[in-house]
Amino acid sequence: MSNYLYSSNLQKRFDKRELVSISQVEYTFQNIPLDGSQLHKGVVNLVINGYVSFDMFFQKEENGYYLYEDHSGVFEVRIRYNQVAQIIENIILCKKDVDLEIDFIKNGIENFDRRMLVDNVLTSEELRDVHPERLYSEEKLDDLIDTYEDRVDTASDWIDDYDTDSYTRSVMRSKLYEYSRCLNALRAERERRHNLSNFK
């Protein structure tokens, strides 16, 4: 199985499906595996510009695109592959927690409004700032808050128990930190939704 290297020289940014900016930066996508005359329908470790990477899982083919999704459900990558010419025509990166789409186009020769031109339509910080909790239903969000509250209480009880050995206490401290971090993110999302509903 060989790997395809894709380069983009024109990028379009869509916020909530509205075109807001354009950049002409060279982006490279590595580790796109070819399986004969088609893209690999499995796990793809997609690398962007040599330093940002995602493990993407194939979902389906739709409207000429291969659709991949990461384990969090936040990122979706759509790759249009021309099987006749055996070339990738464009790659669309979707960040669903903020309703963001970046269309990475191969050739930068297009007529567009120069007033929309920016230095770069995307930052590495945006790619790393992921909020899967924004995709949860109200019911799932409430259930997870209850679950992590229970986990925080249980881990705290283990740590405070004098009969707990030092190794277990150390493990529980690590778990307590992670549980608390997740719980804070979930509570922040509930507060964000509450504020949005009040604003409306």
Image: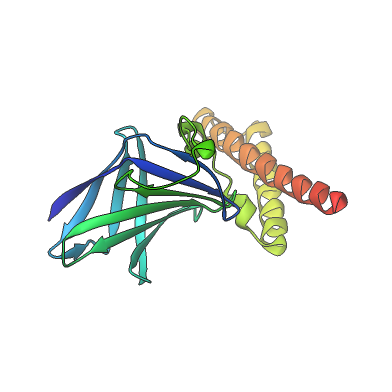
Q: Residue at x 64, y 52 (%)?
A: 134
Q: Return the x and y of residue 163 as percentages of the image width and height.
A: 62, 34
Of all residues shown, which one is farthest toward the right? 198
Q: Return the x and y of residue 35 as percentages of the image width and height.
A: 16, 62
Q: Residue at x 81, y 50 (%)?
A: 194
Quarter holding the C terminus? bottom right
Q: Residue at x 66, y 48 (%)?
A: 148
Q: Quick check: 124 left or right of 14?
A: left
Is residue 156 or residue 72 the one in the foreground? Answer: 72
Q: Return the x and y of residue 90 as percentages of the image width and height.
A: 33, 54
Is residue 120 or residue 168 the one in the foreground? Answer: 120
Colour setting: rainbow
Count all numbered tags in the image, as a single digit. 0
Q: Return the x and y of residue 186 as percentages of the image width and height.
A: 68, 47
Quarter holding the N terminus? bottom left
Is residue 127 or residue 171 the one in the foreground? Answer: 127
